[in-house]
Amino acid sequence: MDGLFRRGGMWWTRLVVPARLRQAAGRREFTKSTGVHDKTIAKVVALVLLADWRRQLLRLDNYPMDDTRLLKLIDGAPALAAGDHVALGTASDALGLEVVDLVREASTGRLSLWFQVGAAAGTGYIVAADVLELVDPEVGPSGGRVVPNNQPGEAQAAVVLGAILRLSDSAEVAGAILGDGLSAVDLVALEAPGRQGWLYCPNEAARVAVCDLLVLRVELEALRARAAATVAPERVQAARATRSPPVGGKDGSVGIWAEKPFSEALTAYCTRSDGLAQALASEHERRQRMAGMMLLVEFLGDMALGEMDADTLRQFRERMREIPDHANRLKGAERGATMTETISILQATRPDYRRMTDAQVGERMQWLARLFAWLRKNGYIHADPALVLRGESGLTKAERIASERDDDTEPGRRPFTEGELLALFAQPHYQTGNGAHVIRRNERWRPFEYWAPLIALFAGLRLGEVAQLYLDDVMEIDGQWCFDVNRRSPDKSLKTSASVRRVPLHGKLIELGFVAYCQRLQARGFRRAFPELRYASGPARYGKELGRVMTKVLRGLGLPADVTFHSLRHCCNGALQRAAGDWSDPMLRTFIRYKVIGHELPEDVNFKHYTSTTVAEMARLVNGAVFELPEIAPFDLEHAVMRLGQYLPGGAADEDMGPAA
């Protein structure tokens, strides 16, 4: 058996790395414990380890780096030019190296690994590193560490949400990733911020995908320079000669605007009647969108259209991930003269600042895609550099998997706590049933502010589903009032096919007067449940103003960013799981909950084809959902009608029906 040896009673195995591959492998040998004392079993475990190590060496011996990846390595990447940290997945794309190559560097100590602490691991304790004992001395730090009962040390409670902390055992974690082929790791100890020799131990272990671990940009650049120095000049010349030319070209063959700067083309698109004005009637919104796209000029320079290709747009996408969320709200010393200066200031003073979400970055990439589509349609360019990016999210594998899940599993959203729900429903209009407390001339109160949170909580409707409700969508079926969630008109949209559903109204909604309110609106000629909401172009549609108001309310109550309107839907789903009642068939109970919430049914033949339910059964589960709320006053119909009259002086004639009009 190759390299099988004993250490402390445990069997280990070793494989020596050939001299020609040691620099690429970053080590002289592979070693790992088999984890067993029995030699017969150890031989079997060792065979698996050795086979994996030999596959890695074979790959290093025959690594086929294509011309594009090679030139990324030689030329460097704009994505690594600014900021302090970058995810392994992003670094892999930028340098033309595989994630496993970067992990291998970390296992030798050439790269340190870092982690940005999320909500799940944001609270814990700071303890002295020398107090901790290894769970298994034979395995080492990667096997875990504990505080001994007889020497707890000085532990201090800490909140480090959003902080970027270094792994206390980067090399051991990287070695475990390589040895076990891990795609994700559980982090239980990180270096404490600002306290050398101390560790931060979260209350809940942080589960993180390998490609989401962070590395220092300066260390990556040093790695790139070392690797680039080993490539023969002849190989680089051959790669440059065979690389496909970019989409552009200054001879005009790719379009009559090939030499026009991006800024001029963008100005034309945003100001011409056949450009952005067709999609956005508001001049203010057009200026905002133009400013967002003009950041490409700030970050990458005012390039000629003929010089821009898909990689240009990818570079811009990576730079946008550094932009602070709601940058327009920054004040004083936090805000620089340019976005680049602002980012630098925040990285120095507030390294945990909240950045643009992936959805926001994706939205801005869609703006650019529409711009280039317009340029191509008009013959200004003959090739669209944004076309190649269709289907690309720019996300790591773990992020892509998360984005494909149902919206209730997305990170950054959690249910309200009991105290947070009490705070939300203790607002004045829930105590009086009206908006009489809003008396300032520049402030408004509208009926949706009372009903939308209640509908999301008691029926589990999404924000967009609430906003686009028609009065005809509130109907009586078999004696039970229901929401009919549909997309029967062009002004409606739903997340998935499973979102089409009928949800019984919880008795609390009827008790507070929702059905009576809908009937009053119908009698006055209105067609929508919330006629005060205006239709907006883009995915938000009727929900744009609702989302803005709810965000303002939640932040005004001091609730954290991971509590959103969608968190009410989380609460509803949880309450349905705990709803009281005698359900002899647990599968039926689960089936009804999926139907109410609008989730895709599990891949089970019984669920898909042999399970059904009635409105009465659904109503029984919905009404079994109970929440600890303060006393809520019934809705004041007369006051609501008066407020609508102020907002829509023409009555039903002023109701915005969007494309359905």
Image (cartoon, rainbow, N blue to C red):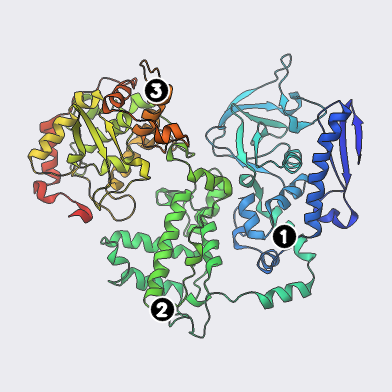
Choose top left, top right, bottom left or bottom right for residue 290: bottom left
652 lies above or below 73: above
Quadrant for the N terminus, please: top right
Residue 458, how many percent across, how many down? Answer: 30, 28
How crowded pointer 2 is (Cα within 10 Å; few <14, some 14-19, many 20+) is rated as some
Dot placed on the residue nearer the N-terminal end, 2 or 1:
1
**Does the image show residue 84?**
no
What's the distance in space between the residues labelled 1 and 3, CA to CA? 51 Å
- Spatial CA distance of label 3 from label 2 is 57 Å
Image position of 468 (left or right of 574): left
What residue is shown with label 3? 418
Give the residue at x 49% y 84%: 253
Tell me where residue 190 sits by quadrant.
top right
Residue 378 percent across, percent down from the top left? 36, 77
Q: CA distance from mark 2 to mark 1?
A: 38 Å
Give whichever of discs 3 and 2 has the lower sequence position.
Answer: 2
Looking at the rendered image, the disc whose residue lies closer to the viewer, 3 or 2, is: 2
Foreground residue among 632 and 622: 622
Residue at the extreme bottom: 251
Quarter containing the C terminus: bottom left
Residues under numbered marks 2 and 1 in contact, where contact means CB atoms less than 8 Å apart: no
- Determine which residue is flagged by label 1: 224
User: Label 2 amino acid?
Assistant: Tyr
In the rendered structure, the answer to whether residue 236 lies left or right of residue 594 reads right
Seen at 86% across and 25% down, the residue is: 37
Residue 535: image location, x then y, percent: 24, 51
- Measuring from the top left, give residue 647's x and y in whole percent: 15, 45
